[in-house]
């Protein structure tokens, strides 16, 4: 049997591979979902729905229709799900960084 | 990896599965069992709390599940995401701190393809010797959780037997370390030693021979105990 340190390195490498797979999976799901955020704007007492997103450096506000709770429910859920996945994706990348540091140690600057 | 967050997710998954009524049919296997063994043996510090990121569940070989539950949907609500292995067709569920995987005992000739569990809408990977774990269940309670895990004795013996089949040296060493650590503890408890003996008596001779050939090098005390049988 090898020393616990070698076993631990193996576990860390296995975890790194898992995190890379998880990153791919989250990216795949994020791409499927609508980007941007949902906004409502009240003009002369009437609510209008917009999808606000970034294209390069420009923020675009795309008019959807008059706001309707039922009509826009699905879109709002999809955007919420994408935001949740993006949060998880950041956590996956953070974990990847930590595992890499555990395997190779922190990079030292001269 | 945030250990606290990981533990929170681990409990959330179990509680959700319990609420859906599937925890009574499937068994928690793998390194997370050690957490329940600690509870069973009054939080003994001798049982190492080494846990991997894999949260493995064993589905019965006959696929007997009492309720129909959409497991992928439950996991999706908790932030898990399906990861597909195109070459094998297996689907596992990833989270930044955990991976949920389903396994099933491989019987007969076996096949590389995962088995579909229709009632749970999942695919389970079939592996040899997992029926051993299913044959010796123990239900351990932790507050409101009641989880079916393999008996500690069979957990350790199973690790010894699968280590002999491992091609990956790292995984083999991990199995051996897990087995010897747990056996070290179990041998301090006479009840557990007699349980090991009674389990060894029920196993096929070929399997016992494999177990003892591994333990001869890594845990000779088991061979001494087996002599008395």
Image (tube, coloured by chain):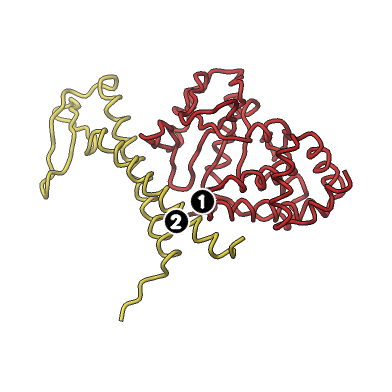
Chain colours: A yellow, B red
Quadrant including the C terminus of chain B: top right
Q: Which mark is residue A13?
A: 2
Q: In the rendered image, is residue B84 in sight?
A: no
Q: Quadrant of residue A36?
A: top left
Q: Which mark is residue A27?
A: none
Q: Is residue A51 left or right of residue B86?
A: left
Label 1 vs label 2, nearer the camera: 1
Q: Report x, y in % for residue B93.
A: 45, 37
Q: Residues within 10 Å of mark 2 (few under 14, many from 20)?
A: some
Q: Is residue B216 left or right of residue A13?
A: right
Q: CA distance from mark 1 to mark 2?
A: 13 Å
**Residue that appears at 56% across and 47% down:** B166
The one nearer the camera, B202 or B68, is B202
Q: Secondary structure at mark 2?
A: helix
Q: Is residue A100 left or right of residue B135?
A: left
Q: Secondary structure at mark 1?
A: loop
Q: Quadrant of residue B141?
A: top right
Q: Report x, y in % for residue A102.
A: 45, 64
Q: Quadrant of residue A61?
A: top left
Q: Is residue B151 left or right of residue A25?
A: right
Q: Is residue A16 above or below residue B21?
A: below
Residue furthest bottom in the image: A110
- Reading the image, the residue beneath label 1 is B168
**Residue that appears at 24% across and 21% down:** A68
Q: Chain of mark 2?
A: A
The one nearer the camera, B203 or A24, is B203
The one nearer the camera, B18 or B26, is B26
**Residue that appears at 70% across and 57% down:** B218
Q: Chain of mark 1?
A: B
Mark 1 touches mark 2? (CB < 8 Å): no
Q: Report x, y in % for residue B220.
A: 77, 56
């Amino acid at each position: 049997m090898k020393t616990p340190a070698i076993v631990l390195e193996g576990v860390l490498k296995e975890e790194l591979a898992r995190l890379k797979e998880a990153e791919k999976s989250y990216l795949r799901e994020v791409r499927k979902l609508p980007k941007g955020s949902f906004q409502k704007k009240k003009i002369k007492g009437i609510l209008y729905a917009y999808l606000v997103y970034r294209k390069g450096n420009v923020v675009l506000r795309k008019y959807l229709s008059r706001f309707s709770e039922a009509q826009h429910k699905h879109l709002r859920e999809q955007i919420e799900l994408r935001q949740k996945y993006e949060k998880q994706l950041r956590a996956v990348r953070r974990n990847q960084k930590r595992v890499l540091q555990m395997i190779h140690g922190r990079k030292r600057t001269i | 990896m945030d250990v606290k967050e990981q533990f929170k997710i681990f409990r959330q998954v179990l509680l959700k599965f319990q609420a859906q009524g599937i925890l009574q049919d499937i068994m928690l296997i793998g390194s997370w069992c050690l957490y329940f063994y600690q509870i069973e043996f009054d939080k003994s510090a001798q049982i190492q709390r080494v846990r991997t990121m894999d949260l493995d569940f064993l589905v019965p070989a006959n696929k007997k599940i009492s309720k129909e539950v959409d497991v992928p949907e439950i996991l999706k609500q908790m932030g898990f995401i399906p990861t597909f292995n195109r070459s094998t067709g297996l689907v596992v569920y990833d989270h930044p701190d955990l991976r949920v995987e389903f396994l099933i005992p491989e019987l007969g000739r076996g096949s590389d393809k995962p088995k579909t569990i229709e009632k749970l809408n999942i695919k389970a990977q079939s592996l040899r010797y997992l029926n051993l774990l299913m044959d010796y269940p123990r239900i351990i309670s932790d507050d409101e959780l009641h989880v079916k895990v393999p008996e500690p004795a069979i957990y350790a013996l199973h690790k010894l037997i699968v280590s002999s089949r491992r091609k990956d040296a790292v995984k083999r060493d991990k199995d051996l370390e897990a087995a010897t650590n747990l056996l070290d503890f179990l041998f301090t408890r006479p009840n557990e030693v007699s349980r090991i003996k009674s389990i060894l008596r029920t196993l096929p001779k070929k399997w016992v021979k494999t177990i003892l050939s591994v333990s001869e090098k890594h845990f000779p005390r088991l061979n001494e105990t087996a002599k008395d049988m």
